[in-house]
Amino acid sequence: MSKIIGLNYGSHDNGASLIIDGKLVCAIEEEKMTGVKACYIAFNKPEKSLAYIEKEFGVTLENCDAVAIAYPYFREFVKTHYSQIAHKFFSYSHHDCHTLGSYFTSGFDGKAISISHDGKGYRSRGKLYLCEDGELEEVYSQYIATTASLAGIWASATNSLGWKMLKDEGKVVGLAAHGNFDSQIYDWLSQCIYYEKFSFKPSNWESLYHYIFDIYQLERFSNHEFRQNFAFTLQKFTEDVFQKYLEDISSKFPDYRKLCLSGGLFANVKLNQHINSLGLFDEIFIHPSMGDGGLATGAALICAHEMGEITKPLILENSFLGQHHSREDWTSTLQPHLENIVIDVYTPKSVANLIDKGEVIGCFFGKTEYGPRALGNRSIIVRPTDPETHRKLNEKLKRTEIMPFAPSVLAEEAENVFEISKSRYTAEFMTLCYNTKYEWVERIPAVIQKLDRSARPQLVVREKNPNFHSIIEEYMKISGIPVVLNTSFNAHGEPINNYPSQVIKHLLDGVVDHIATEYFIISRKPA
């Protein structure tokens, strides 16, 4: 029995993964274990993630067969552990972990291209691999300055708009839907970075985009119309530049009709929708933890491939690879609050009835999701029929999100509601947008961007997520709608909640009306 621990111990989004006998059994981000967003703590050691792996699986750095880590990593790890594990210690480049982590979870048979792009790495800002049934060939590495990274421009743009990089780029994507094209802004962006012959290139003056964002246009970023138009134009510029790159790839490698994407840039679900709609590829896949939170898994997968444990891409059963809490954990957490709560038996039908009444439900089932999307195990769900839900729910959660909330839809009903023709597997992880069919726009307004009919659906497969599927199925029996609104179970500034104590606090504070677990339904006592 082989046991491989994967680690990311870099500047942000650190965590650990575990592969046993070629199966990914655990992948967990340190921020979910600490309750503090990774963007607020630099070089956060993944010690709680490792402690959980030891407690749950009995696997440690000392007794595992291999330790795989993404490079570059914090040198303190080497000083502390290297003498004990030197014989089984393997490091892999940042973008190898991205590209091959995505490929080896894509489920793709035959020829596939895997590309990455983000704001950092070891010398590179992205790579391109040709892959075929487990055979790998690196054909391109983007050895360029940070300033020639599209993701780097998004980070600077996010800061200039008054939000926080590595956290709020999604707000910029949401803001883009409200703006219009501005040719002057497009010209500025074109002077910062351009694409030519498989290479993203910076301007002659490396810090030009910092000048444009942080100094020259600083006052304009406070203007509401300018902010909207800037976000729209940045989104279009990104799509245009990356499309040229993909067209060159498709032209040079026409037999490769499947595409894997990874790196922080592909958290941009509208960009992913654009790529999916180009017709250059028959199928695309985005790794569920596309940013640096996926590096630990990528490192472990590469190591497993080199050891012969994984010979071809896996199909993930689901993304529930984090921590589980027992009935005993819940009982001890609830004990101090018994005077303020009511505990009932859990049934999917009971939860569906509460949803239909307009109640806000916090779901806390099984294991915590891997990656930035809540997919039913750590989700807040609401009926999708009320136009005012976006504002009301954001007030409860103390969020200022602009991006619409996402719909979770029964997989067997998805094509009836959304214009889905391909890339269904990656849609199970809520990583790209599709357009909504016209007849459904007014029926589910709480989960639709009405300006362009787009939505970011999660396809809920019965066999992969039976609890969540049963709740939506029961809601459909009542309402005729196979969709619920889904947002992550956390308040503003928090990572997805991982502990019963976190979500009980939200119940008592009125953030949610009820909590549904596999053991029971918990509600506040009436005042």
Image (cartoon, grey):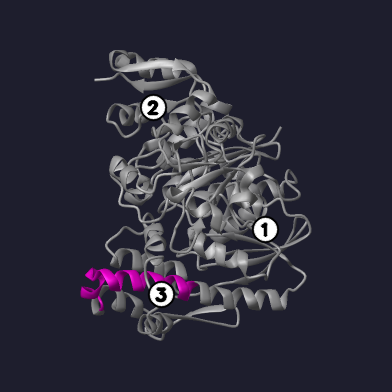
Mark 1 = which residue?
Answer: 421
Mark 2 = which residue?
Answer: 514
How far apart are labels 2 and 3 at the CA level? 41 Å
Q: Residue at x 29, y 65 (%)?
A: 161
Q: Which residues are magenta?
A: 217-238
- Give the quadrant of residue 320: top right
**Does the magenta segment cover residue 119?**
no
Q: Tell me the element at label 1.
A: loop
Mark 3 and mark 1 residues within 8 Å of each other at the beta carbon: no
The location of residue 456, given as percent across then percent down, is 51, 53
**In the image, what residue type sits under mark 2?**
His
* Above/below status of 444 relative to 527: below
Is any atom of residue 478 visible in this view? yes
Magenta residues, dominant SS class: helix
Any mark on residue 131, and which? Answer: none
**In the image, what residue type sits under mark 1?**
Ser
